[in-house]
Image: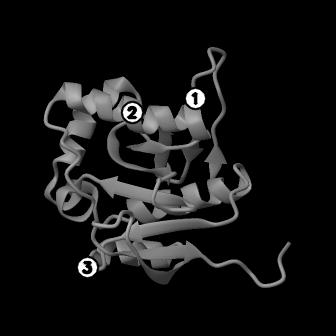
Amino acid sequence: MLNEGAQNSAGAYVDVIRTARLVLRQLELSDSRFILELLNEAGFLRFIGDKGVRTVADAREYILKGPIDSYVRYGFGLYAACLRDGTPIGICGLVKRDGLADVDVGFAFLSRYCAMGYAAESAAAVLAHAHRLLEIRRVVAITAPDNASSIAVLEKIGLMFERRVRLTEHSPELNLYATVQPENRP
């Protein structure tokens, strides 16, 4: 069940999305140690890339210049995916990239929480949030062609392979998946 969050009296989000097992909330500077760990996991480095985050200060900059800037500019971004007890286990959300015309859904989880269904649960909830609340009709996702786990998640949440893309002229080729729009829909 998807339950979309509200703002508190100070205007800060308490949470953005709740699922059966997770709370997705805006990332905060206090998440720096978690982000430092996540961005340096082998799977993140291999399939998403090295963001150059090596210290807690680097992680704070990443949060400020990435997710927090995105919340202000677009009204969405990457969220902390937390267990119901508040433990952050990954990130999942919407990203507006310079190299893509459409908003894309992205996710990454600490390896100890992989293969438990959290990525599919959170990504499906983010996709529903994008369509229902944000009224974004087309959502895409990109992944390395050899990232079988992410491909399985994208297909499970209903995205279909569309084509290969490069975000920049010299970047590697990625698979682009997209939501399927029903025919004759306004």
Q: Secondary structure at mark 1?
A: loop
Query: Residue type at mark 2?
Result: Lys
Q: Residue 168: x percent and y percent?
A: 36, 63
Residue 119 image offset from top left, x and y in percent: 40, 61
Choose mark 3 or mark 2, whichever is in front.
2
Q: Secondary structure at mark 3?
A: loop
Image side of residue 146 versus residue 87, left or right: left
Count the marks: 3
Q: Is residue 43 above or below residue 80?
A: below
Query: Which is more toward the observer, 22 or 96?
Result: 96
Residue 144 lies in quadrant: bottom left
Q: Which residue is mark 3?
A: 146
In the image, what residue occupies the spot 48% across and 51% down? 93
Check disc 1 and report the residue beneath it: 13
User: Which amino acid, by three-letter code, is at mark 1?
Assistant: Tyr
Q: Quadrant of the N terminus?
A: bottom right
For residue 40, above or below residue 61: below
Q: Quadrant of the C terminus?
A: bottom right
Looking at the image, residue 68 sits to the left or right of residue 62; the answer is right
